Image: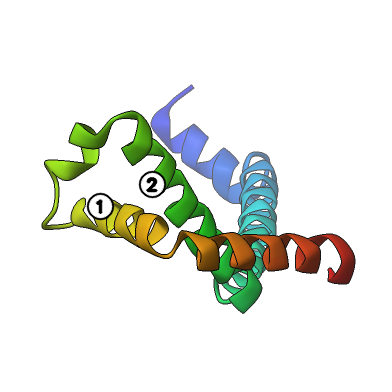
Amino acid sequence: MKVSDWSQRSSSGHHAGNACGAVKKVNKWQEEASGDLHKSAIQFESALFNFQSLLTVVLLLICTCTYIRGLAPRMLDKNKEGLLGIFWKCARIGERKSPYVAVCCIAMAISILFFT
């Protein structure tokens, strides 16, 4: 076959219909994927800005940092400044305010178990 025969065939619709069908399927898949992505992004944002979840994460961070500092104090003490200094500060809060942190953990546990 000559090149002109191939161009006539594709323009006559023998292969053009298959190509359009494939493009339609790809576009449909992209629409479904973007819809799922949009839904998951909305769900992620609602969990991110949930105040109870935020308090739970902060309390767990404080308790974990305090526990790690009790096991290996040098690991947190060498990073008192900068981004990793946040963990040292959480450990200090857990050490100094441990009765308040314990009461908050118990209150959060009761809240999650019985009111959620």
Q: CA distance from mark 2 to mark 1?
A: 7 Å
Q: What secondary structure is marked by label 1?
A: helix
Q: Are marks 2 and 1 in contact (CB under 8 Å)?
A: yes
For label 1, the residue is 88
What residue do we see at 58% from left, 59% from top?
102
Residue 105: x %, y % from top left: 63, 60
Residue sitting nearer the eye, 94 or 11:
94
Q: What secondary structure is marked by label 2?
A: helix
Left or right of 106 on screen, residue 99: left
Q: Quadrant of residue 37?
A: bottom right
Residue 39: x %, y % from top left: 67, 67
Left or right of 9 on screen, residue 107: right
Residue 109: x %, y % from top left: 73, 60
For label 2, the residue is 65
Asked if 99 appears above or below 73 in the picture, the reply is below
Residue sitting nearer the eye, 16 or 6:
16
The three-letter code of the residue at mark 1 reads Trp
Classify mark 1: residues with Cα within 10 Å, few (<14), some (14-19) or many (20+). Answer: many
